[in-house]
Image (tube, grey):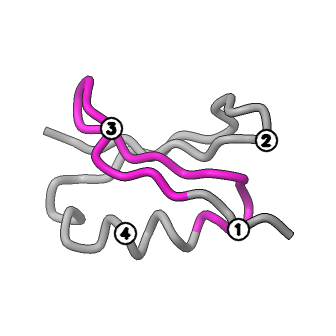
Amino acid sequence: MDLLLYGLNEAGEPAFAERLPPSERARMREIAHSHLQRFHAVEVWEGPTCVLRLRRRPD
């Protein structure tokens, strides 16, 4: 099953989505962390389950 990565804005609404193939599971945290430069938070979902949630530190 593919993983879905969402970049969230400050209101917690999706502003970006990217499908990650199962082969990227080992790099999921690294990929999500790289998106924190552009988004307030990043979530990775596998079907109906959130498997990773990262947020920027407050400035």
Q: Is residue 44 left or right of residue 38?
A: left
Residue shown at 23% from the left, 53% from the top: 21
Magenta segment: does it hold 51?
Answer: yes
Which residue bears the numbered disc 1? 57
**Three-letter code for the amino acid on which mark 3 is drawn:** Cys
Q: Is residue 38 above or below residue 26?
A: above
| Mark 1 closeness class: few <14, some 14–19, many ≥20 residues within 10 Å | few
Judging depth in this view, the residue of 32 and 10 nearest the camera is 10
| Secondary structure of the residue carrying numbered label 2 | loop
Marks 3/1: CA–CA distance: 20 Å
Q: Are marks 4 and 3 in contact (CB under 8 Å)?
A: no
Magenta segment: does it hold 33?
Answer: no
Judging depth in this view, the residue of 40 and 1 nearest the camera is 40
Judging depth in this view, the residue of 42 and 24 nearest the camera is 42
Please report the bounds of the magenta region as a residue range: 35-54
Q: Which disc, if any, is residue 29?
A: 4
Q: Are marks 2 and 4 in contact (CB under 8 Å)?
A: no
Percent of width and height locating residue 11: 77, 32
Q: Earlier in the sequence, mark 3 or mark 1?
A: 3
Q: Which disc, if any, is residue 50?
A: 3
Marks 2/3: CA–CA distance: 18 Å
| Secondary structure of the residue carrying numbered label 3 | strand
